[in-house]
Image (cartoon, rainbow, N blue to C red):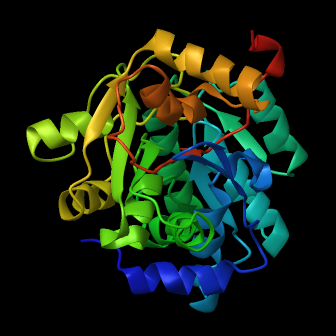
Amino acid sequence: MTVSGDEVRAAAERIAGRVRRTPVIQVAPGLTLKLELLQHTGSFKPRGAFNRLLSAKEKGELTGQGIVAASGGNAGLAAAYAARELGVPARIFVPVTTPAPKVAKLHLLDAEVIQVGNEYAEAYQVALEARDASGALLLHAYDQPEVVAGQGTLGLELLEQAGMFDTVLVAVGGGGLIAGIATALGDNAQVVGVEPELAPTLHRALAAGQPIDGPVGGIAADSLGARRLGDLAFAAAREYAVPSLLVDEDAIVAARNELWHQYHLAVEHGAAVAYAALASGVYQPAGGERVVVVVCGANTDPSTLS
């Protein structure tokens, strides 16, 4: 099953006025950054959250029971924000390892926060149990059609904002963002996934021919900490021939610091992953190639930048 371009375009209409149209900046010849870290709640996630909740509202599925969601942090923030804006309660399940700034922001968004387990998959299992017990709507962090279509609206913006470009580098965790962008762009550009070596969900799936579970670790695990790639992301990767590149921990840290020192962008480690492919030389553009890097998240402690 894949998400269609029509679904992405419908999502753009549905969430218009609910999310920000984030800017792009050209920082060097042939290199453009899409500043999605300026989105509500500090990541791209509200696009999918609003599309999921508004779609459910249209169908009468969004009730007084509200929503439940599991997250490493960013998806939970987006779910809580969208729920608050639509006037429904939100219960957000996050691992005990979730950074304190993200947990604090969840409380500020009036969400009930339950910390359980050491990684996303454990929090997700408890969220499923809460959904079954309460009848609340489940908002998946990355593997629901409405979520993927919502994330794809970022790709539609790129087509309007960035002029002609050849390649888009996107960080991959569960894969909702890359699935949406690949669907939105279609044949207009090559989409390349970039992953931490210690959490290579897309890389593993492509090697195995299907999404498979694997260990999660590393400095970017709070935002790219899925055990396995989503089915929708795998289908999109197959359809649009999306490759995976891996970057190591040192490259991620160096890229995060470079984004701060060169462009004054304070990003979380997961949001530095796509840029790390360029900065480390893992991805080397051809002569004249026009590259867009999606800078996707800002939920970090700035005091850790050096």
Q: Quadrant of residue 182?
A: bottom left
Q: Residue at x 63, y 65 (%)?
A: 47
Q: Residue at x 62, y 57 (%)?
A: 68
Q: Quadrant of residue 6?
A: bottom left
Q: Is residue 77 left or right of residue 13?
A: right
Q: Is residue 189 left or right of residue 208?
A: right
Q: Residue at x 34, y 25 (%)?
A: 282
Q: Where is 132 relative to 72, above or below? A: below
How far across and down, in percent of the image, does residue 271 sit? 59, 35
Q: Can see residue 91?
A: no
How far across and down, in percent of the image, does residue 208 sit? 10, 38
Q: Is residue 256 left or right of residue 302?
A: left
Residue found at the far right of this picture: 108
Q: Quadrant of residue 153?
A: bottom right
Q: How many marks?
A: 0
* Nearest the eye: 274 or 176: 274
* Nearest the eye: 26 or 266: 26
* Nearest the eye: 157 or 176: 157
Image quarter hosting the C terminus? top right
How far across and down, in percent of the image, does residue 149 sit? 48, 72
Q: Can see residue 169?
A: yes
Q: Where is 46 relative to 37, above or below? A: below
Image quarter hosting the N terminus? bottom left
